[in-house]
Amino acid sequence: MCHWRYLGMLVFIALEEKIIFSKLGDNATLSCIYQGKKLPLKNLRVYWQIADDQEECSVVHALISGQDNESEQCVHFKNRTQLFWDKLENGDFSLLLLNVSQSDVRTYKCVVLQKTEYTKVIHQAEVVLSLAASYSQPILSGPIRNSNSTGEEVTFSCRSGNGYPEPNVYWINKTDNSHLLPSELTITPHTDGTYSVFSTLKVKATSDMQIECSIENRILQENLSANYTQEKQSNGSSTESHKNLEKNGRGAQAAGIISIVILMGLLAGLTCWLWRRRSSKLASYTGNEAIHLHDQF
C-alpha cells in the first residue's frame, strides 16, 4: 500500500506501508528498500523512528554519513538493532530488530535523506509490527460418567497456552456441527506477553456424544482442535473411543508380558530337567565303572 505525501520543494514521495508479524523472542526485519540509483553512503542519512509523535523518545536507529549514530537512540532499542551492511549500497536500508517483545508492537518509520546542495527526503516507508505466537495443542478432558448417565448434565474442559494474541474459543457439537456456548471462559495473560486459555462446557449427556474444542489464532490463521467421541455399540452399551484405544493398548501390552514370563518359565523347567537327567546318567556310569574294577581285582 502506498500513500503520497507532499514534502515541500515540489517533491512527492511514496510512503510504503507494510504489516509484518513476529513471534515473541524472534528477530524481525523491518523493510525499507530504495529503488532508485545507487548513492554514496557518505551523502545519506537514514533514520528509523517510532511513527507516533507522542513518544518522548522516537529514535530507533540512525545512520549518518555511512556510520551508525547511537547518540539519540532510545534506551529500549540499545544493542537490539542492526542494519544489513552488505546491502546498504544497493539501497536496502531494512532494520533487524532483535528479541522482539510485546512492547515492540508499534508503527515504525524509515526516512532516507540525501544531502547535496540541500537535504531532501528521497525515500520513506512505514512498517507495522504485530506479534503472534502459536497456541499449544489443546487438551480436552471428557466427563467421568456411568453407562446409564444419558440425559444427565456432564462437563468438558479444554485448555491451551503460550499463544498471542487472545484466542477465539469454539465448542462444537460434531454430530450436527452446531456451536455450543461455553459455561466458562478464562483467558490469562503472562509476564512474557502470551496468554493461556481455559474453558468448560456443560451439556446433557447422549449415547453418541461428539464434542470438539477449537482454539483459533486469527493472526497466524491457525486453528487447533481436540475431539471427544463416544460411540454407541451394537449391544446397546456406549464406550469412549479415545479411552478404549488406551485400554486396548494396555491389555495387549499386559498379554505380551505374561506370554514372555510363561515362556521363560517353560525354558527354565526344561533346562532343569535336562540337567538332572544328565547328572543321573553320569552317576550311573560312575557306579558301573567302580563295580567293574572291583571284579577285576
Image (spheres, helix red, strand yellow):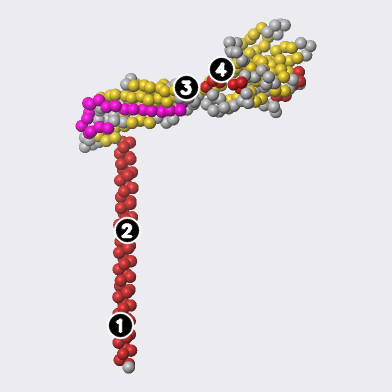
Q: Amino acid at mark 2?
A: Leu
Q: CA distance from mark 2 to mark 1?
A: 37 Å
Residue 267 at what x, y percent from top left?
Answer: 33, 62
Q: CA distance from mark 4 to mark 1?
A: 102 Å
Q: Amino acid at mark 1?
A: Gly
Q: Which quadrant of the figure has residue 265?
A: bottom left
Task: Please name the residue shown 25% across and 30% down the image.
Answer: 207
Front in this rendered view, residue 291 or 217 = 291
Look at the image and give the residue range highlighted in magenta.
144-163
The image's mark for residue 61 is: none
- How many residues crowd around disc 1 within 10 Å: few (fewer than 14), some, or many (20 or more)? few
Q: Which residue is mark 3?
A: 165
Q: Secondary structure at mark 1?
A: helix
Q: Amino acid at mark 4?
A: Arg
Front in this rendered view, residue 275 or 188 = 188
Q: Residue furthest right?
A: 117
Q: Secondary structure at mark 2?
A: helix
Q: Which residue is mark 2?
A: 263
The image's mark for residue 287 is: 1
- How many residues crowd around disc 2 within 10 Å: few (fewer than 14), some, or many (20 or more)? few
Marks 4 and 2 close (CB-CB < 8 Å): no
Q: CA distance from mark 2 to mark 3?
A: 58 Å
Residue 151 at what x, y percent from top left?
Answer: 22, 26
Front in this rendered view, residue 212 or 103 = 103
From this viewpoint, is residue 33 visible? no
First in sequence: mark 4 or mark 1?
4
Q: Which residue is mark 4?
A: 106
Residue 277 at what x, y percent from top left?
Answer: 30, 72
First in sequence: mark 4 or mark 3?
4
User: Mark 2 or mark 1, which is nearer to you?
Assistant: 1
